[in-house]
Amino acid sequence: MFVKENLNNFKETLPSHVSLVAVSKTKPVSDIRGAYEAGHRIFGENKIQEMVNKHEVLPEDIEWHMIGHLQRNKVKYMAHFVSLIHGVDSLKTLKEIDKQAKKHDRVINCLLQAKIAREETKFGLTFDEVKDILKSEELAALTHVKVKGLMGMASFSTDQKVISDEFKSLKRLFDELNKEGQELEILSMGMSGDYKLAIEHGSNMIRVGSAIFGPRNYIAS
Ligand SMILES: *Cc1c(COP(=O)(O)O)cnc(C)c1O
């Protein structure tokens, strides 16, 4: 009940051009079922094994998004079903995704994760690295991955100005690349604490966990 109501209330507030990835990491299958019964189909996980386990027991028409940092050696476990990989931060990883996608005769959609936060712990590519990858012949040669857009995580900060500036910088990169002829469609930015700012600054895909499913209890999971 709790999840369904939260989800429906939450979705009502979103503009129609924004898609919602319901981040279900650490949450039980019953919570995902609740959201599914409320009509939701897009779920995000940050660990490949956890996503694989949930995929096995949940309906086939769920779109699974991998939002966490990728371990290249585990890409093979999700290659047959993952629908979007948000956290790609190297050409090497794109090559591995391409290789695994080929085995299943699929094209896997990916986002390049750009570093916008100042914190050392956040993964991601510099803006120059994003440009280099997108323009590389190596990427052009990969037939089973498609870079659909960019993903970014803002600093863990309460300073709205800092967060806004980070989102703005990624939107600027996104627009610049499209002006140069790229066809990027997805700009994935915004989480429970900052999705409103993210949407204000051009996000069209938000990844929201705790605002829908409640706080995560890492000890119990
Ligand atoms: C956990 C996570 C989220 C969701 O976080 P909430 O604050 O619970 O909304 C979004 N994006 C990534 C990459 C995450 O790991």
Image (cartoon, grey):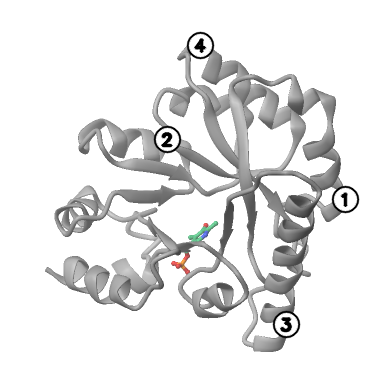
Q: Does the residue labelled 3 lie within 8 Å of ligand 1?
A: no
Q: Residue 143 carries which label?
A: none
Taking the spot 42% from the left edge, 23% from the top edge, the residue there is 80
Q: Name the residue under label 4.
A: 103
* Of 45 and 82, the residue lying toward us: 82
Q: Which of marks 1 and 2 is in front?
A: 1
Dot 4 or dot 1: first in sequence order is 4
Q: Name the residue under label 2.
A: 49
Is 27 rendered above or below residue 8? above
Would you say the residues marked 3 and 1 are in contact, meaning their CB atoms lie under 8 Å apart? no
Label 2: element kind = helix
Distance from disc 3 to disc 2, alpha carbons, whole Å, reads 34 Å
Taking the spot 39% from the left edge, 41% from the top edge, the residue there is 64
Dot 3 or dot 2: first in sequence order is 2
Q: Residue 159, can we see it? A: no
Dot 4 or dot 3: first in sequence order is 4
Q: Which of marks 3 and 1 is in front?
A: 1
Q: What residue type is labelled 1?
A: Asp
Label 4: element kind = helix
Is 126 rendered above or below residue 156? above
Q: What residue type is labelled 4?
A: Lys
